[in-house]
Amino acid sequence: MNAIRGAEDPDQELAEQLRQAIGRLVRATRGRADALPRARAELLGQLDRDGPQTIADLAAGRAVRHQAMSRAVKDVEALGLVRREADPRDARAQLITITAAGTAAIDRDRKARRDLLATAIRERLDDAERLALQQVPRLLDKLTAP
């Protein structure tokens, strides 16, 4: 096994291999399965996961400028994927909320990614590999626990 640039010990090398493999998996599934452009999918995903937010909150969550997020919101709003609502905590602010159409769009992409992975698991892995893979979600959750 080749040493990975910057890896000083076996745990660092494993961490780098894992980081690269997860990145390849995410890019491959999104590239082959997603119908939504990435920026729209990320915006809708953030709203779906975290609930209604202001444009400022959305911009901070995506690490983009307020103006860029404002344009992105206008784009998905014009498609009926989000709507604006009054913020009950601040009469001057508006909350951006995902609509049923937005939820359906993000769910279609998620299902397409899931189906793509399920097909790859079924066609490319043997029983022992599938058993090993069943441990991965729990282990990843353990690695990312607070």
Image: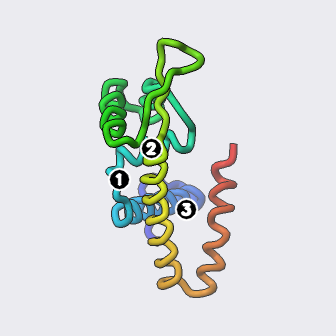
Q: Nearer the viewer, residue 18 or 84?
A: 84
Q: Which amino acid is tagged 1?
A: Leu
Q: Quadrant of residue 42?
A: top left
Find the distance from the CA under tag 1 to the CA under tag 3.
33 Å
- Report the front residue among 101 and 114: 101
Callout in the foreground (2, 3): 2
Q: Residue at x 48, y 17 (%)?
A: 93
User: Which residue is the site of mark 1?
Assistant: 36
Q: Which class describes the residues within 10 Å of circle 3: few (<14), some (14-19), or many (20+)?
A: few
What percent of the width, then of the height, locates residue 111? Answer: 49, 64
Foreground mark, 1 or 3, reads 1
Q: Is residue 81 left or right of residue 131?
A: left
Q: CA distance from mark 2 to mark 3?
A: 32 Å
For numbered disc 1, what is the local secondary structure?
loop
Q: Give the residue displayed 43% in from the left and 59% down from the top.
A: 109
Mark 2: secondary structure: helix
Q: CA distance from mark 2 to mark 1?
A: 10 Å
Q: Earlier in the sequence, mark 1 or mark 3?
A: 3
Seen at 45% across and 71% down, the residue is 116
Q: Amino acid at mark 2?
A: Leu
The answer to whether the residue labelled 2 contacts the one labelled 1, judged by CB atoms less than 8 Å apart, is: yes
Q: Earlier in the sequence, mark 2 or mark 1?
A: 1
Q: Which mark is residue 14?
A: 3
Residue 24's place in the image compared with 69, above or below, is below
